[in-house]
Amino acid sequence: MLFNPGIEFRDAQREEQQFRVRLAILSGFVLVMFFLLAARFIFLQLIQHDHYHTLAEANRISVVPVTPGRGVIYDRKGVQLAYNFTAHTLEITPAKAMDVNATLDQLSEIVEITPRDRRRFKQLLEESKSFESLPIRSRLADEEIARFAANRYRFPGVEIKARLFRQYPQGELFSHVIGYIGRINQKELDKLEAEGDIANYRGTDHIGKTGLEQSYERVLHGTTGVEQVEIDSAGRAVRVLSRTPPASGSNLALNLDAGLQALVDKAFGERRGALVALDPKTGGVLAFVSKPGFDPNLFVDGIDPQSWGELRNSPDRPMLNRALTGTYPPGSTFKPFMALAALTSGKRTAQQAISDPGYFQFGNHRFRDDAEFGHGSVDMYKSIVVSCDTYYYILANEMGIDAISQFMARLGFGSRTGIDLAGEAEGILPSQDWKMRRFKQKWIAGETVSIGIGQGYNSYTPLQLASAIATVANDGVMFRPHVVNYVEDLRTKARTVIEPKPLRSLDLNPEHIDTIKKALVGVNKEGTSSSVFAGTEYVSAGKTGTAQVIAIKQGEKYVEGRVQERHRDHALFIAYAPAENPTIALAVIVENAGFGARAAAPIARLVFDYYLLGKEPPDDKKGAAQ
Amino acid sequence: MIAWYLRRIGRLLTAHIDGPLLAAVLLLMGTGLMVLYSASNAGWPRVTGQMMNMLVALGVMWLFANIPPHFLMRLALPVFALGVALLIGVALFGDVVNGARRWLHVGVTRIQPSELMKIAAPLMLAWYFHRYEGTLRARNYLLAAVLLLVPVVLIARQPDLGTAILILASGGYVLFLAGLSWKIIAGLGVAGLAAAPVAWHLMHDYQRQRIMMLIDPSEDPLGKGYHTIQSTIAVGSGGVTGKGWMSGTQTHLDFIPERTTDFIFAVYSEEFGFVGNLVLLLLFLLVISRGFVIAAQAPTLFARLIAGAITLTFFTYAFVNMGMVSGILPVVGVPLPLISYGGTSLVTLCLGFGILMSIHTHRKLVHT
């Protein structure tokens, strides 16, 4: 220190000076950096605040649809035909599960998974997107739920969910009228999108596929509610912020009678066919049966391929709705309508009689009657009661196809009745025009002859036949058939009645109607079906029919025993009762059952006895109907 | 008489405590506890745990405030050597946690030697420059740089890029304050830019991803970009005055990851907004400016350098953390000083503040 104090001092001072400069530079650096941060805060918190506020809200708020309960369907007496129940389902989201097959194997150690469940799930898997939650088992038992809960960690992507299920307690009985719901497919999704209903279906898995479930889908579905929930980063709901409750779907009260439906089903037994019973004064559908049916419960959660294959490949065609879409030649049940056409057009009076030699010769073709040597002198009453073919061969030939076609169209033949079920068939009401359009050929006059007895081209649904006979029973005032009686809003309890509105009045001469009605009463009293209706406490009216399935060759006689079962004639019967004030009209067809009076009429008798007198069929009577 | 003794004891206890610095530190600690309470969803265990950490850290601060700087100077080289030895130990026998080898078992407990280096590295460099004071040549700076790079490389390889960069920065501050010539600084700058592609090549995948995330966090919103996106949303949605204490939706609905530790600033920022952020910046500036005053008034080169380095390292922590949370810096594991939960960083920081206080309160005694 003593040697060189000056240098030492200057050095130290210079160093300190340099340090201070550098410290000042770094202070500036610190300030600049903090200003940079402040600028970033200004950008984020002041300028972009709205944007980030929105993002934060979107983060925390999730809009969850609240699915409404589907409307319940009741019969006219309040019997439940379709209802919902809550059950726990085990669901897999394939995208979240590592290996679906391994997951299924391991799951089956904990909960019961039948081969059918697996097949059904495979089918679903192919039809769905991998991020959808797909049910593998429904209706888990409590102990199964507990067992799964304990093993939950082993199964990523597998969850237990509480869901509403549809149940059809009557099984096959109403399969063709109520139909079923099933998982929404892409086509239906597109349709909902196009109709602007897609928002209402967020959260809904199922949609009506057939029957009333389809045609009343909007009414049954209800309005989906909305819940705004605050969620955490894991997507768990923390609390509900707001809630718009869902509005449950409305209930349907039907005109159908479950007891009547069951009775008809039993009467058919194993035979194929259809029956439609209407209230002639309202068009209310009292019974609507197509045999065989199927179990609609199979479809609710996706049918497994095996069951579907069985249904589709069965020669009995259980999926075919015979009452609505099956068309059959009306056979002799067409005759009263022909007679009415003749009276209305003035071609015949009731008293005019023909002489029946047992056939009608048209050119070199001989149209034969049932009775080999004819019915003798036949007037209109007799023509219906004994079902004389010759009378109608001649009549049809005289009227010509277009006159027949025009009158029958007014009775609803060849066009949809407008029933509240989708997919109704139109049937075939032949005319010159129709043949030209259909076959690009001219109508041949000879073809008109067999139309007179309900054969030939004409082909109608059982529903059309029922509607036609109901119209006659109701003196020519026609109602649109409807299965649903009223729609009941669950919340307001308000009932919207499906109005029984007259579709049209045929403006028939009451005398003409009376003539036909008397003849129809005659059929059940002294005609083709008199034995079936012997001893009834009410007066009924009816007409038997037999429809050819295959044409028999000229000169050959139809012998039932010789013909293969599936080529045998269809048995038909149309009827109403009581004759003086009809409250029920029906059409019944039993496929390949032969003569109408034998197979079809007894079913009508059972229906009338039940509906008019409240009689349950005795067990031995069921046997008699077979 | 008793009063005289009490006063005397009081004076002994507080003789080496710097009032303004202590006040600023306590304010930050208080803020930290308040935010931590919210960040842990009103969970007391974390808060009381952090209080214990703070008591220990303040004890360490008092202890080091009472150790004269020249004594610390003597410790510099051995502590640094020990630190390097431990780092080598970690590289050879360390425990792997979350894919990184950072911890070393020492008897009953395990330590993170990189934490020790945060103080040991600048201490050693300050000692080194002090020792060669007056005769400093370029090769001195070069040797110092090499000494610094040894722990930096060891830590970067753990891998712990955040800590490595911080230690590099703290050493760099010492070099700069010691008068590293501008020519070399400029040369290093150019070399650094040139080396960037090489460094990129040497980086681990996750480190590269973090840098990529910074450029475009939306590229991987549920993966690597998630932290940044969610913390940026938290900061931005805070607005001018914030959503209020305990009311941050991002925080309380669990959208902010590591919200009590590295990302606690997102919680603070969401709940106290822009105004709160400015207040926090001011509090940090208070500590920094007091540190600078102490450095400027320090009597020896060692004291000046170490005071400057400690202050600037503190600043760097704060800046890197806030920059990372607000999305302008890549995600590196750096806590927000005095606010984030965690005892180690608190103790290290307070140890530094203790040294600052020691430098300031011993300055008149040193001049001989």
Image: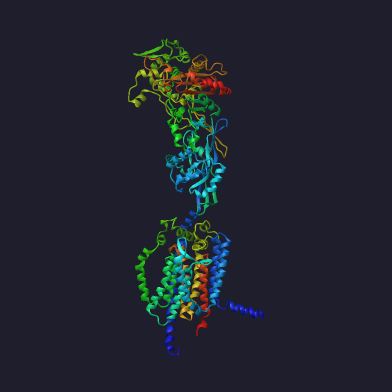
Q: Residue B241: in sight, yes or no?
A: no
Q: Would you identify the image quadrant in which residue A22 lies?
A: bottom left
Give left or right: position of A552 versus B247: left
User: With respect to residue A468, does A218 lie above or below?
Assistant: below
- Across and down, in percent, residue B266 comes to 49, 62
- Across and down, in percent, residue B351 comes to 52, 72
Q: Would you identify the image quadrant in which residue A339 lies?
A: top left
Give the number of callouts. 0
Q: How is the image coloured?
A: rainbow
User: With respect to residue B2, does A602 lie above or below?
Assistant: above
- Across and down, in percent, residue B28 comes to 53, 68
User: With respect to residue A376, does B39 lie above or below?
Assistant: below
Task: Point out the residue furthest to the right here.
Answer: B1
- Across and down, in percent, residue A214 comes to 47, 35
User: With respect to residue B250, does A32 lie above or below?
Assistant: below
Q: Residue A231: in sight, yes or no?
A: yes
In the picture, the quarter occupied by the N terminus of chain A is: bottom left
Task: Point out the residue furthest to the left here.
Answer: A441
